[in-house]
Amino acid sequence: VIEELRGIVGAAHVLTGADAVARYVRDWTGRFTGATPAVVRPADTAEVAAVLALCARDGTPVVPQGGNTGLVGGSVPLHGEVVLSLERLRAVGPVDPAAAQLTAGAGATLADVQAAAAGAGLLYPVDLSARGSATVGGMVATNAGGLHVVRYGDTRGRLAGYEAVLADGTVLRHLAGLEKDNTGYDLGALLCGSEGTLGVVTAARLRLVARPRHRVTALLAFSSVAAAAGAVAELRQVESLTAAELMVREGVALVRDRFGVAPPFAELHPAYLLVEAAAGHDPVDELAAAADRAEPDDVAVADSPDARAALWEVRERHTEAVNLLGPPVKLDVTLPHARLAAFLEAVGTTVEASCPGARTWLFGHAADGNVHVNVTGCAPAGDDAVTAAVLELVAEQGGSISAEHGIGTVKRAYLHLVRTPAEIATFRRLKSALDPQAILNPHVLLP
Ligand SMILES: Cc1cc2nc3c(=O)[nH]c(=O)nc-3n(C[C@H](O)[C@H](O)[C@H](O)COP(=O)(O)OP(=O)(O)OC[C@H]3O[C@@H](n4cnc5c(N)ncnc54)[C@H](O)[C@@H]3O)c2cc1C
């Protein structure tokens, strides 16, 4: 098979040595390391199709991979699969200004797409800190959310068309991007969140938005996590709200100690919301009024790009800072807003009970009820106990066990907490219809 793969993509693009494949077999967190006979790097859709047809003929399992920034152990070959890297499909097409759309290859990074949109005076509004590496294909496959979902929705909402290759090499293409197009099943939407189990995304037609001329960013400090969570209701009144990000004292102190960046206040506060509003008019008064009603203990307003970047850096470096403590258990959950404060207060105790001595780090996209629960200091043996305890707490509260990172390998044993047997059976029917030999990411998503 490896010889035939070389014949399809060229010998230089079938990597086999341990050193050559190292960065493709280890995940971003360092928690998951697998092994692969080969990493295949096709140049275009036709080569992707030929690679998959060959793997289907041979029954060779494949893990599709983009930027390998996924956080749920879904992008690395944990069972000896071939890695199908889309990183060479990096072309970003011209912006269609009338449609406010562009087509990007699966391997284009989020930063590539954002730059192309900006070049045409527009904005691609899905944003996340892994923007320099996360790819279009990976973002579709995980239905990435990020920092601005409250205003602009997730990747599924941005997808106006798609191109993908099924497990047997069949190419599906629907890239016209017509805004009105009720012609049957929305296969692009089905690929969103499919985590490489139903097809390999090779290109996406993405919706852009007008670039807001005014933007204001502020950091609100609160006397408790519950007060910060409660403030979200006031902030949601701001029509131009684009972000409301939660941080708590421990995480902010960690970022300060690791990277020397900190909020511009004399002392640390128990909780913070980093809020941003953007509009065609200056949204500062509207945001200030909502912030007043939320009754923070302190407020810092960023009035220059540098000041704004400094506030965002405190939030964006949380993931990296926690990772430096050693591979964390990373749980990304959504709570109904009414339960958010109670969950934030209870989850540390839940973690401690299932893994004594572990530390819990909380941050996330508060406007979406989305909390990243990171746990460090738990021996690998305790990971499953922590995962089970936290996810069961989330399910009891009516939340989701995955807000935006996906199910991957980490959470597939818990899918039943939030999906009914009938739904999981339907997932399986879809999987076997599109990938009857189960060669596409066979150990991901489905229990
Ligand atoms: C610092 C940091 C911050 C992050 N912040 C956020 C955030 O705010 N919001 C958020 O949603 N995520 C976030 N993530 C997670 C991650 O960036 C996203 O899940 C992203 O969409 C993954 O893209 P990728 O190209 O790296 O995919 P990969 O990690 O390579 O793959 C992820 C999954 O998609 C599948 N896949 C990849 N490419 C394809 C393809 N072309 N076709 C089919 N399947 C494919 C893989 O098999 C795997 O199951 C963050 C990650 C990091 C490291």
Image (cartoon, rainbow, N blue to C red):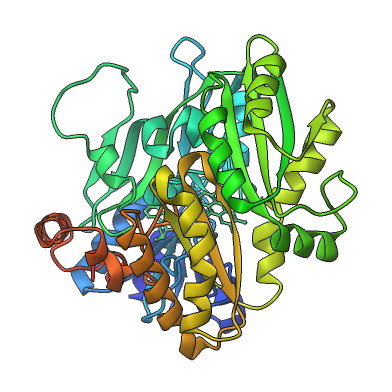
Locate residue 14, reporting x and y percent: 48, 69
Q: Residue at x 67, y 34 (%)?
A: 295
Give the quarter of the image for residue 377: bottom right
Q: In the shown orientation, is residue 6 left or right of residue 196? A: right
Q: Residue at x 61, y 33 (%)?
A: 114
Q: Is residue 176 above or below residue 156?
A: above
Q: Quadrant of the C terminus?
A: bottom left
How many labels, in total?
0
Q: Is residue 156 above or below residue 398?
A: above
Give the quarter of the image for residue 419: bottom left
Of the pair 40 and 208, the residue shown nearer to us: 208
Q: Is residue 157 above or below residue 143?
A: above
Q: Residue at x 58, y 37 (%)?
A: 231
Q: Is residue 398 visible?
A: yes
Of the pair 221 and 412, the residue shown nearer to us: 221
Q: Is residue 35 visible?
A: no
